Amino acid sequence: MSSFEYTDGDGGRLAVKPLPGVPYILVMTDIPGSAIPVTRVEEVVAGLRDMACQTGGTAPAPRRRLTELEHDAAWHAIEGTAGEDGADPGTVLAAVLRALGIDPPAVEEAGA
């Protein structure tokens, strides 16, 4: 089993490890703790979710409602790409993700 570790700019550490044989994760932090920038919270949540999955537990992906601005951006991305020559679902999806500021999952290079 692996672990997830995060170190803030001041050297404060947060570590998350699955506990073998039980459906719990162990969260450890240095005193006085680790300051997590809001731009990195999703990374920490993903690390927590990954450790929960390693214990055999299930951690459902969070759901949220799009803001009106996000909805408009997605709508215009679809509208702008769906009519293009050669537009396929992947092209439209990529445009929507780009409009929402969401990175698609990394695709492993062939032969890697």
Image (cartoon, rainbow, N blue to C red):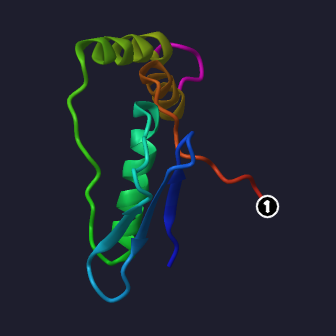
Q: Secondary structure at mark 1?
A: loop
Viewer-nearest residue: 43 or 12: 12
Magenta region: 83-87
Viewer-nearest residue: 90 or 15: 15
- Whether residue 80 appears in magenta in the rendering, the answer is no
Q: Position of residue 79 (x, y in %)?
A: 40, 12
Quarter of the image with the C terminus is bottom right
Question: For the view shown, which residue lies furthest in the bottom direction?
Answer: 21
Question: Looking at the image, which residue is at 48% across and 25% down?
Answer: 92
Question: Looking at the image, which residue is at 28% across and 85% down?
Answer: 22
Question: For mark 1, what is the residue?
Answer: 111
Residue 69 occupies quadrant: top left
Q: Position of residue 74 (x, y in %)?
A: 37, 18
Residue 91 occupies quadrant: top right
Viewer-nearest residue: 3 or 105: 3
Question: Looking at the image, which residue is at 59% across and 23% down?
Answer: 86
Q: Position of residue 5 (x, y in %)?
A: 51, 59
Question: For the view shown, which residue lies furthest in the right direction?
Answer: 111
Q: Up-down: is 89 above or below 86?
A: below
Q: Is residue 11 left or right of residue 76?
A: right
Q: Is residue 107 left or right of residue 15?
A: right
Amino acid type at mark 1? Gly
Instruction: Please count the marks in the image.
Output: 1
Q: Give the main secondary structure, helix, strand or loop, of the magenta stretch.
A: loop
Q: Up-down: is 65 above or below 26?
A: above
